Amino acid sequence: MAERAQERDRERERERDRERTLRIRLDQPRIRRARLLPEYDPEAFGRMSERIARFLGTGRFIVWMTVFIVTWLAWNILAPDALRWDPYPFIFLTLMLSLQASYAAPLILLAQNRQDDRDRVNLEQDRKQNERSIADTEYLTREIAALRMGLGEVATRDWIRSELQDLVKELEELGRERDLFPPDGERRSDVPDR
Protein backbone atom coordinates (compact mmCIF):
# COMPACT_ATOMS: atom_id res chain seq x y z
CA MET A 1 0.00 0.00 0.00
CA ALA A 2 2.80 2.38 0.83
CA GLU A 3 4.52 1.46 -2.43
CA ARG A 4 1.37 2.31 -4.39
CA ALA A 5 1.11 5.69 -2.69
CA GLN A 6 4.77 6.43 -3.43
CA GLU A 7 4.29 5.35 -7.06
CA ARG A 8 1.28 7.66 -7.37
CA ASP A 9 3.26 10.53 -5.87
CA ARG A 10 6.12 9.92 -8.33
CA GLU A 11 3.64 9.79 -11.22
CA ARG A 12 2.06 13.07 -10.10
CA GLU A 13 5.49 14.68 -9.81
CA ARG A 14 6.42 13.53 -13.34
CA GLU A 15 3.13 14.93 -14.65
CA ARG A 16 3.82 18.29 -12.96
CA ASP A 17 7.33 18.39 -14.42
CA ARG A 18 5.99 17.61 -17.86
CA GLU A 19 3.37 20.40 -17.55
CA ARG A 20 6.07 22.87 -16.42
CA THR A 21 8.21 22.08 -19.46
CA LEU A 22 5.21 22.38 -21.76
CA ARG A 23 4.25 25.71 -20.29
CA ILE A 24 7.70 27.03 -20.93
CA ARG A 25 7.53 26.14 -24.64
CA LEU A 26 5.55 28.72 -26.54
CA ASP A 27 5.64 26.87 -29.84
CA GLN A 28 3.30 24.15 -28.60
CA PRO A 29 -0.28 24.51 -27.43
CA ARG A 30 -1.07 23.98 -23.80
CA ILE A 31 -2.79 20.81 -22.73
CA ARG A 32 -6.48 21.39 -22.19
CA ARG A 33 -7.60 20.69 -18.69
CA ALA A 34 -10.76 18.80 -18.01
CA ARG A 35 -13.60 21.14 -17.14
CA LEU A 36 -16.06 20.48 -14.40
CA LEU A 37 -18.83 22.46 -16.06
CA PRO A 38 -20.25 21.42 -19.42
CA GLU A 39 -19.18 23.48 -22.43
CA TYR A 40 -21.75 25.20 -24.62
CA ASP A 41 -21.77 27.34 -27.72
CA PRO A 42 -22.70 30.89 -26.64
CA GLU A 43 -23.87 31.78 -30.14
CA ALA A 44 -26.26 28.82 -30.29
CA PHE A 45 -27.52 29.62 -26.78
CA GLY A 46 -28.06 33.25 -27.81
CA ARG A 47 -30.02 32.24 -30.91
CA MET A 48 -32.16 29.92 -28.79
CA SER A 49 -32.82 32.68 -26.26
CA GLU A 50 -33.86 35.02 -29.08
CA ARG A 51 -36.32 32.45 -30.40
CA ILE A 52 -37.79 31.98 -26.91
CA ALA A 53 -37.99 35.74 -26.32
CA ARG A 54 -39.61 36.19 -29.71
CA PHE A 55 -42.20 33.53 -28.83
CA LEU A 56 -42.85 35.02 -25.37
CA GLY A 57 -43.67 38.34 -27.03
CA THR A 58 -46.39 36.93 -29.29
CA GLY A 59 -50.14 36.82 -28.89
CA ARG A 60 -49.98 33.06 -29.40
CA PHE A 61 -48.01 32.68 -26.15
CA ILE A 62 -50.50 34.82 -24.23
CA VAL A 63 -53.44 32.82 -25.60
CA TRP A 64 -51.82 29.45 -24.76
CA MET A 65 -50.78 30.66 -21.30
CA THR A 66 -54.32 31.90 -20.67
CA VAL A 67 -55.81 28.60 -21.83
CA PHE A 68 -53.37 26.69 -19.60
CA ILE A 69 -54.13 28.78 -16.51
CA VAL A 70 -57.91 28.72 -17.04
CA THR A 71 -57.79 24.93 -17.52
CA TRP A 72 -55.64 24.55 -14.39
CA LEU A 73 -57.99 26.69 -12.30
CA ALA A 74 -61.12 25.04 -13.67
CA TRP A 75 -59.75 21.54 -13.02
CA ASN A 76 -58.66 22.37 -9.48
CA ILE A 77 -61.96 24.07 -8.65
CA LEU A 78 -64.52 21.90 -10.43
CA ALA A 79 -62.95 18.43 -10.31
CA PRO A 80 -63.73 16.01 -7.48
CA ASP A 81 -61.52 16.38 -4.41
CA ALA A 82 -59.63 13.17 -5.16
CA LEU A 83 -58.55 14.44 -8.60
CA ARG A 84 -57.43 17.93 -7.55
CA TRP A 85 -53.64 18.27 -7.32
CA ASP A 86 -53.45 22.00 -6.45
CA PRO A 87 -56.30 23.15 -4.16
CA TYR A 88 -57.50 26.73 -3.72
CA PRO A 89 -54.47 28.90 -2.93
CA PHE A 90 -52.95 27.32 -6.08
CA ILE A 91 -49.44 27.25 -4.65
CA PHE A 92 -48.12 24.88 -7.32
CA LEU A 93 -49.47 27.10 -10.14
CA THR A 94 -47.86 30.13 -8.52
CA LEU A 95 -44.59 28.24 -8.24
CA MET A 96 -44.72 27.23 -11.92
CA LEU A 97 -45.49 30.78 -13.08
CA SER A 98 -42.67 32.15 -10.92
CA LEU A 99 -40.28 29.59 -12.35
CA GLN A 100 -41.36 30.47 -15.89
CA ALA A 101 -40.87 34.18 -15.17
CA SER A 102 -37.47 33.59 -13.57
CA TYR A 103 -36.27 31.87 -16.75
CA ALA A 104 -38.05 34.19 -19.18
CA ALA A 105 -36.60 37.44 -17.80
CA PRO A 106 -32.90 36.56 -18.28
CA LEU A 107 -33.60 35.05 -21.70
CA ILE A 108 -35.37 38.22 -22.78
CA LEU A 109 -32.50 40.34 -21.43
CA LEU A 110 -29.98 38.17 -23.27
CA ALA A 111 -31.94 38.59 -26.50
CA GLN A 112 -32.09 42.36 -25.95
CA ASN A 113 -28.34 42.50 -25.33
CA ARG A 114 -27.70 40.61 -28.55
CA GLN A 115 -30.01 42.99 -30.40
CA ASP A 116 -28.18 45.96 -28.85
CA ASP A 117 -24.88 44.51 -30.08
CA ARG A 118 -26.28 44.13 -33.60
CA ASP A 119 -27.69 47.66 -33.47
CA ARG A 120 -24.33 48.99 -32.30
CA VAL A 121 -22.54 47.29 -35.21
CA ASN A 122 -25.14 48.59 -37.69
CA LEU A 123 -24.85 52.08 -36.22
CA GLU A 124 -21.06 51.98 -36.57
CA GLN A 125 -21.37 50.83 -40.20
CA ASP A 126 -23.92 53.57 -40.90
CA ARG A 127 -21.65 56.16 -39.28
CA LYS A 128 -18.70 55.07 -41.44
CA GLN A 129 -20.88 55.13 -44.56
CA ASN A 130 -22.08 58.64 -43.66
CA GLU A 131 -18.48 59.78 -43.17
CA ARG A 132 -17.57 58.42 -46.61
CA SER A 133 -20.62 60.12 -48.14
CA ILE A 134 -19.73 63.43 -46.50
CA ALA A 135 -16.14 63.13 -47.73
CA ASP A 136 -17.36 62.37 -51.26
CA THR A 137 -19.77 65.30 -51.14
CA GLU A 138 -17.05 67.67 -49.95
CA TYR A 139 -14.72 66.45 -52.71
CA LEU A 140 -17.40 66.96 -55.37
CA THR A 141 -18.18 70.42 -53.96
CA ARG A 142 -14.51 71.39 -54.22
CA GLU A 143 -14.35 70.04 -57.78
CA ILE A 144 -17.47 71.98 -58.82
CA ALA A 145 -16.06 75.15 -57.24
CA ALA A 146 -12.80 74.63 -59.14
CA LEU A 147 -14.73 74.13 -62.39
CA ARG A 148 -16.74 77.30 -61.78
CA MET A 149 -13.58 79.26 -61.13
CA GLY A 150 -12.05 77.82 -64.30
CA LEU A 151 -15.17 78.64 -66.29
CA GLY A 152 -15.11 82.16 -64.94
CA GLU A 153 -11.96 82.72 -67.01
CA VAL A 154 -13.33 81.03 -70.14
CA ALA A 155 -15.55 82.86 -72.59
CA THR A 156 -19.04 81.42 -72.54
CA ARG A 157 -21.44 81.37 -75.48
CA ASP A 158 -23.67 84.05 -73.93
CA TRP A 159 -20.73 86.33 -73.27
CA ILE A 160 -19.40 85.93 -76.83
CA ARG A 161 -22.88 86.59 -78.24
CA SER A 162 -23.26 89.76 -76.18
CA GLU A 163 -19.78 90.93 -77.21
CA LEU A 164 -20.52 90.30 -80.89
CA GLN A 165 -23.82 92.16 -80.61
CA ASP A 166 -22.00 95.08 -79.02
CA LEU A 167 -19.42 95.03 -81.84
CA VAL A 168 -22.16 94.95 -84.50
CA LYS A 169 -23.84 97.95 -82.89
CA GLU A 170 -20.56 99.84 -82.77
CA LEU A 171 -19.86 99.00 -86.43
CA GLU A 172 -23.33 100.14 -87.43
CA GLU A 173 -22.81 103.43 -85.60
CA LEU A 174 -19.38 103.89 -87.18
CA GLY A 175 -20.81 102.99 -90.57
CA ARG A 176 -23.52 105.58 -90.28
CA GLU A 177 -21.01 108.16 -89.29
CA ARG A 178 -18.69 107.30 -92.22
CA ASP A 179 -21.38 106.06 -94.51
CA LEU A 180 -19.76 102.63 -94.79
CA PHE A 181 -23.02 100.82 -95.01
CA PRO A 182 -25.17 102.44 -97.67
CA PRO A 183 -28.88 101.91 -97.87
CA ASP A 184 -30.06 98.83 -99.69
CA GLY A 185 -30.55 100.45 -103.05
CA GLU A 186 -27.03 101.77 -103.44
CA ARG A 187 -24.07 99.53 -103.94
CA ARG A 188 -20.74 101.07 -103.43
CA SER A 189 -17.34 99.63 -103.04
CA ASP A 190 -15.41 100.30 -99.93
CA VAL A 191 -12.21 100.33 -101.94
CA PRO A 192 -11.54 103.66 -103.66
CA ASP A 193 -11.38 103.60 -107.44
CA ARG A 194 -7.98 103.41 -108.95
Image (tube, grey):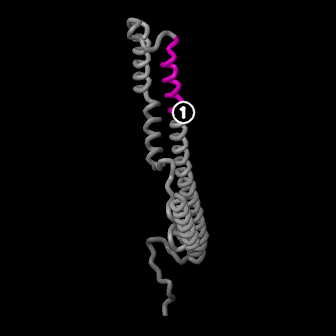
Q: Which residue is denoted by mark 1 in the rendering? A: 105
The residue located at (43%, 11%) in the rendering is: 76
The residue located at (51%, 40%) in the rendering is: 111
Q: Nearer the viewer, residue 141 or 54?
A: 54
In which quadrant of the rendered view does residue 26 lie?
bottom right
Q: Horizontal and vertical percent for residue 179? A: 55, 76
User: Eyeballing the image, is 101 above or below 67?
Assistant: below
User: Eyeballing the image, is 114 above or below 88?
Assistant: below
Is any atom of residue 166 visible in this view?
Answer: no
Which residues fall within the magenta stretch? 89-105
Q: Which secondary structure class fits the magenta region best? A: helix
The residue located at (52%, 45%) in the rendering is: 114
Q: Nearer the viewer, residue 109 or 186?
A: 109
Q: Horizontal and vertical percent for residue 15? A: 53, 66
In which quadrant of the rendered view does residue 159 lie?
bottom right
Q: Horizontal and vertical percent for residue 147? A: 57, 69
Q: Secondary structure at mark 1?
A: helix
* Amino acid type at mark 1: Ala
User: Eyeballing the image, is 44 above or below 34?
Assistant: above
